[in-house]
Image (spheres, helix red, strand yellow):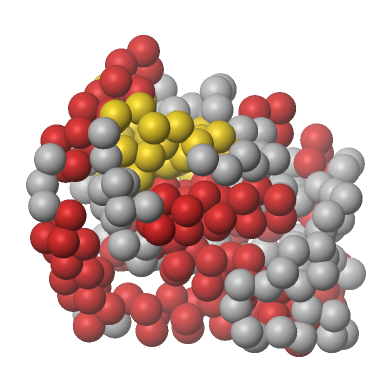
Amino acid sequence: MKAYETVLVERPADGVARIVMNRPAARNAQNLQLTYDLNAAFDDAAADDAVKVIILAGADPHFSAGHDLRAGGKNAAGADFPPVFNWGGFSEPGAHGLYGREQEIYLQMTRRWRNVSRPTIAEVQGRCVAGGLMLAWACDLIVASDDASFCDPVVTMGVCGVEWFVHPWELGPRKAKELLFTADSWSAREGYRLGMVNHVVPREQLRAFTLDLARRIAAKPAFALKLTKEAVNGALDIMGQQAAIDRAFALHQLCHAHNQQQFGSLVDPAGVPAPVKDKAKV
């Protein structure tokens, strides 16, 4: 198994790979290093025929606080990391460069993880915020601890939801609107009631429960698992999910362009929490 700067990879059982986001001091917020480490770890797991199920977890105390808005060392898409997709234009001025960057590191990367050819389980504890929702929603199943909470607060920042816009499918249209309009945090139990979360378990049982679920899935034939996942994802695509995500992504970019004109930043600074604002490029 390869070593990564921000990700740990474990093999806790036959047929199971466990990918752990390992930026606990940043609450596993996603900088470019974590994004590309995750992508490489998913690729490596999918290339190993011994792996039948992938668990995605986050080092304690939280699953993921979303996108890391703070300025970092390696932050240039297409330069600091070799691009995975062929949109390009990362260094172009204005909306062109931003569109290319967010196509690469958010929209297409998340779509790639959603379609990885293995059943995936998100093991969620603590806070799962904005970009953290994208990670959990890219997985096929979600197991949450009883202290987990889910939130997409970006409307407060003047943006119409995160880049992987599957809220209506995960929550239903009315509850999706409520989550976005209010920016409230919802409990794991509420996520379970709405069908977004598969299981809610005590925090101390989360890892063992998720691993047992992964073991039971890994006992099934690998080819049948792959095709079953493809069948369900394909049904969602035929229902229009992919087209809807692409449309919402374009609206997301329009929000960024408006904020740039109004405030000189990609988001409305009034909606950014003070501890983040002090260190962020907003």
> Eyeballing the image, is 127 above or below 89?
above
Residue 81, visible in the rendered structure: yes
- In the rendered image, the quadrant that contains the C terminus is bottom right
Residue at 82 percent across and 70 percent down: it is 79
Residue situated in front as seen by the camera: 216 or 241: 216
> Eyeballing the image, is 221 above or below 24?
below
Q: Quadrant of residue 26?
A: top right
Q: Give left or right: position of 148 versus 209.
A: right
Residue at 39 percent across and 32 percent down: it is 11
Residue 32 image point, x, y percent: 71, 55
Residue 209 image point, x, y percent: 25, 24
> Eyeballing the image, is 11 above or below 172?
above
Residue 185, visible in the rendered structure: no
Residue at 71 percent across and 50 percent down: it is 33
Residue 58 image point, x, y percent: 51, 33
The residue furthest top is 204
Q: Quadrant of residue 137?
A: bottom left
Residue situated in front as seen by the camera: 94 or 271: 94
Q: Give left or right: position of 9 versus 29.
A: left
